[in-house]
């Protein structure tokens, strides 16, 4: 099928270096799926390495191996970085 050109959809092979205001450490997350709208990535091209932006949509699947609170922690990081 042909895309609408709204942005980029990624699977679990993409990591984000999340720009969290006031963070004292780098926060890297790799959601199970994500979307970044056009105009966010420089020159609308996917760079090599971590994306240094906030995904517009991040999908995390709860795994049986996740410890209690781990999913909530990941989601809080996305929200703190500005994920809608």
Image (cartoon, rainbow, N blue to C red):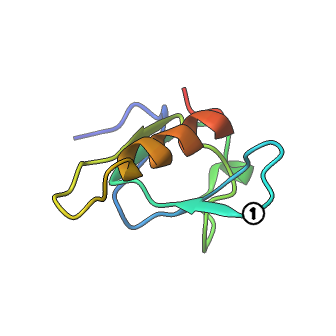
User: Is 8 left or right of 46, judged from the image as shown?
Assistant: left
Residue 55 visible in rendering? no
Please report the residue visible at 66 percent of the width from the left and 40 percent of the height from the top: 81
Please report the residue visible at 75 percent of the width from the left and 63 percent of the height from the top: 25
State the quadrant of the C terminus. top right
How would you rate the neighbour count of disc 1 (Cα within 10 Å): few for under 14, some for 14-19, many for 20 or more? few
Considering only vertical position in the picture, is 81 above or below 25? above
Please report the residue visible at 35 percent of the width from the left and 61 percent of the height from the top: 12
Along the line of sight, the residue nearer the viewer: 59 or 20? 20
User: Is 18 left or right of 59, judged from the image as shown?
Assistant: right
Q: Quadrant of residue 32?
A: bottom left
User: Is 30 left or right of 76, judged from the image as shown?
Assistant: left
Q: In what element is the residue under mark 1?
A: loop
**Where in the figure is residue 60, as x and y percent of width and height?**
33, 47
Q: Residue furthest top?
A: 84
**Where in the figure is residue 79, as x and y percent of width and height?**
57, 33
User: Is 28 left or right of 30, judged from the image as shown?
Assistant: right
State the quadrant of the N terminus. top left
Q: Residue furthest left?
A: 64
Please report the residue visible at 80 percent of the width from the left and 42 percent of the height from the top: 21
Q: Residue furthest bottom?
A: 49
Q: Residue furthest front?
A: 68
Along the line of sight, the residue nearer the viewer: 72 or 39? 72
Q: How many marks?
A: 1
Task: Read off the residue under disc 1.
Answer: 25
Residue 81 visible in rendering? yes
């Amino acid at each position: 099928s042909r895309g609408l050109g709204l942005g980029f959809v990624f699977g679990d092979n993409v990591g984000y270096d999340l720009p969290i205001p006031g963070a004292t450490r780098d926060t890297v997350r790799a959601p199970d799926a994500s979307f970044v709208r056009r105009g966010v990535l420089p020159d609308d091209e996917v760079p090599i390495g971590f994306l240094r932006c906030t995904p517009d949509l991040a999908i995390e699947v709860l795994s049986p191996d996740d410890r209690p609170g781990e999913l909530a922690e990941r989601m809080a990081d996305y929200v703190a970085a500005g994920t809608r």
